[in-house]
Image: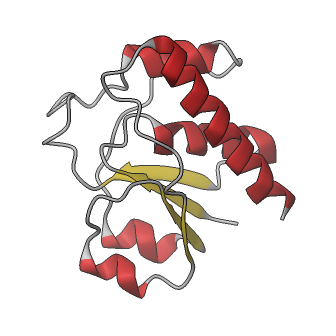
Amino acid sequence: MKILFICRANAGRSQMAEAFYNKMTNSHDATSAGVDLKNSVKGDDPSIPELVIEVMKEVGIDMSEKKRKVVTPQMAEAAEKVIIITDHPMPEYLKDSHDIEMWLDIPDAVRTPIEFHREVRDMVERKVQELVKN
């Protein structure tokens, strides 16, 4: 199933979800994007934050080459399921997506210590495991 994970800046939660989904399904069916990259801590820097890379390496996933990207109507159209992991306002075209799921119980780890990044990583992993099972 083609899945699009969306969070605010595509710097943490959605990137983790994409990586976990693709690993668990042995596919490249998931992608991720953000809705507000420019106003995030990373600004115009397309790289993933070091703490995210570090906590994902701890579970055997190398995200050091991943780049942040902004969501587009084409991404939403190509997805069979859209999972939103932020309460940040979404573009109008996402309201027309056929299958949207909200994961608003996963907090943003921006500006938090590595321990909190680990907690968020583990929350994302559990949600993706549930998704893959169903």
Residue 97, position as x, y percentages in the image: 46, 82
Q: Name which residue lies at 55% across and 32% down.
A: 120
Q: Is residue 62 visible?
A: no
Residue displayed at 45% across by 23% down: 65
In this picture the colour scheme is secondary structure
| 79 and 125: which is toward the camera | 125
Can residue 112 be seen here? The reply is yes
Residue at left 71%, top 17%? 60
Give the image location of residue 16, x and y in percent. Answer: 55, 36
Q: Is residue 126 left or right of residue 12?
A: right
Is residue 48 positioned above or below 77 on the image? above
Work out which quarter of the rendered image holds the C terminus and state it.
bottom right
Relative image position of residue 44 (x, y in whole percent): 14, 33
Q: Which residue is at a point 26% across and 72% down the rendered structure image?
A: 91
Left or right of residue 8, residue 14 in this image = right
Q: Vertical placement of 79 versus 87: above or below? A: below
Quadrant hosting residue 37 = top left
Query: Front-most of 113 and 25?
Result: 113
User: For the N terminus, which image quadrant?
Assistant: bottom right
Q: Is residue 65 left or right of residue 26?
A: left
Farthest right residue in view: 133
